[in-house]
Image (spheres, rainbow, N blue to C red):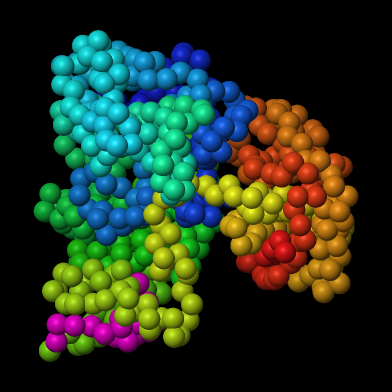
Amino acid sequence: MITRKDLIKKYIEFFKSKNHKEIANSSLIPDNDPTVLFTTAGMHPLVPFLLGQKHPQGKRLVGVQKCIRTGDIEEVGDNSHHTFFEMLGNWSLGDYWKKEAIEYSFEFLTQILKIPKEELSVTCFEGDKDSPKDTETAKIWKRLGIEKVKFLGKKDNWWGPAGKTGPCGPDTEMFVKDLEIWNDVLMQYEKDKRGNYNEAKQKNIDTGMGVERTLTIINNLEDNYETEVWKPIIKQIEKLSDKKYSENKREMRIIADHLKAAVFILAEGIKPSNTEQGYVLRRLIRRAIRYGKQLGISTEKDLTTPLVIEIIKIYPEYNLLKKNENIIIDELNKEEEKFERTLEKGLNLFSKLTKDKKHLTGKESFLLFQSYGFPIEMTLELSKEKGIKTSKEDFEEELKNHQKLSQTATKGKFKSGLADHSEKTTKLHTSAHLLLAALKKVLKDSNISQKGSNINPERLRLDFSFDRKLTGEEISEVEKLVNDQIKKEIPVSREEMTLEEAKKQGAEGAFEEKYKGIISVYTVGDFSKEICTGPHVKNTKEIGKFKIKKQESCGAGVRRIKAIIQ
Ligand code: SER
């Protein structure tokens, strides 16, 4: 058996031996990417660098990244799709190209993982109006002795852009006995707003190897859930339900998958709610609970705690999990209790409403949501199982009349997208640094630190440690201090240094944990110094007029400010 730990170590050591630098495993919540809720691939935290910004650790990178994909929560239950997963990857930022990328992949698969090359097959891009047939890639594979080379179209052998525009290109996928093990994306193009594929100034390699699936393949297993990263959870569910996995695969996979993802999201400090990440979290927990019930796990039994303990044991190196174990258990219990109080009643109401008809109105699905906490996705799933027609649009219509649920839930923001680096967000990024520095000065508290930030083209949102409401005067002072810095036309500079050096210089760093090796520090005169990946304006004069729109409390000891540029 090759363990998860071995696999990750082998991968990283291999690429280090090829002069790659190991990058940190970033947060599951993208720092400053408003277009997505979660980190969806290893390349995600690297977007600014794929677009040409210089990476402080160089042009060859390797790492393992925790990811969440929520596009298809309702699809989970088969043997290889997971909401939470880990992805290994190596990247060339304008450095090596197809030949080396493929040779590295080949060497790792055959020499390190010792997969006989006869068992390998690959696919390449077959070509279309945007890009020619990728015979170059196919030739490289053939030269290495791979016989089974297939050409497929955009649907299969093209990756990105993740959003509407940005880096993308053909990819070449590797299979072991028909199971995909690795994907090398050959980022050759940048798609523009008009839909044209332009030759990229910087050509990148972006690869992704799913840890769970690779463990299944190299250990000759048939089901990801038999690997060490799932089995202990499944065993525990068997115990709790007194049922066998072999006879209840779908339900048990869903419970294991959803609770694992929930544990990781909770560890990031997200709480179940009706907006954004919190809403995804709520749906995951509630769907797991419903399937627990379907398996006959009694309401009196605590479903979540024993599973959390197993999940945390699987991932000993994620300090965030252990550190937040009590909070995670607490939050899950709270949500479990809250939902179980109403689940039964809700299910009864659902049966009653659909007893004599095959259709649920928007009002009715809204009633299930409002009174019994049924996420619409759950009602839709229940309806599908029972052959009942329910419309999401009708529900949303009803919802709009009552309360504004997150834009996220309704507009499908879960789908992946590239980070937004528009002019507006760039200005807001720099404003966020100025705001944090101004808060410290005005509130005369140098211990204030950033607890979170989210920026989109409309506004910035900054969460910071402080335990009372700011007075109107303080708000005006902070605003004025920020605007003074803008008027002073201060250049913004970026330097690279080690974390120790940055700390020595007194740089702010709310996300210190994730930085390894050399980092970027942005300095605005003697006003602000922060560890950050950017992007930022070159001079504060570019920003415009800064205005605070709102302040609110955001949990104990944390305040939230929303601000805009006028
Ligand atoms: N970005 C590609 C993927 O997600 C390769 O890492 O598959």
Residue 255 seen in the figure = no
Residue range (magenta)? 357-375
Q: Is residue 223 above or below residue 284?
A: above
Residue 406 percent location from the top left of the image: 47, 70
Residue 362 percent location from the top left of the image: 31, 83
Residue 358 seen in the figure = yes
Seen at 36% across and 15% down, the residue is 99
- In depth, the one of 206 and 278 nearer the eye is 206
Seen at 63% across and 66% down, the residue is 554
Screen quadrant of the C terminus? bottom right
Q: Is residue 437 above or below residue 379?
A: above
Residue 479 percent location from the top left of the image: 81, 63
Seen at 39% across and 23% down, the residue is 11
Image side of residue 345 versus residue 530, left or right: left
Seen at 25% across and 11% down, the residue is 144
Image side of residue 492 versus residue 354, left or right: right
Residue 189 percent location from the top left of the image: 43, 33
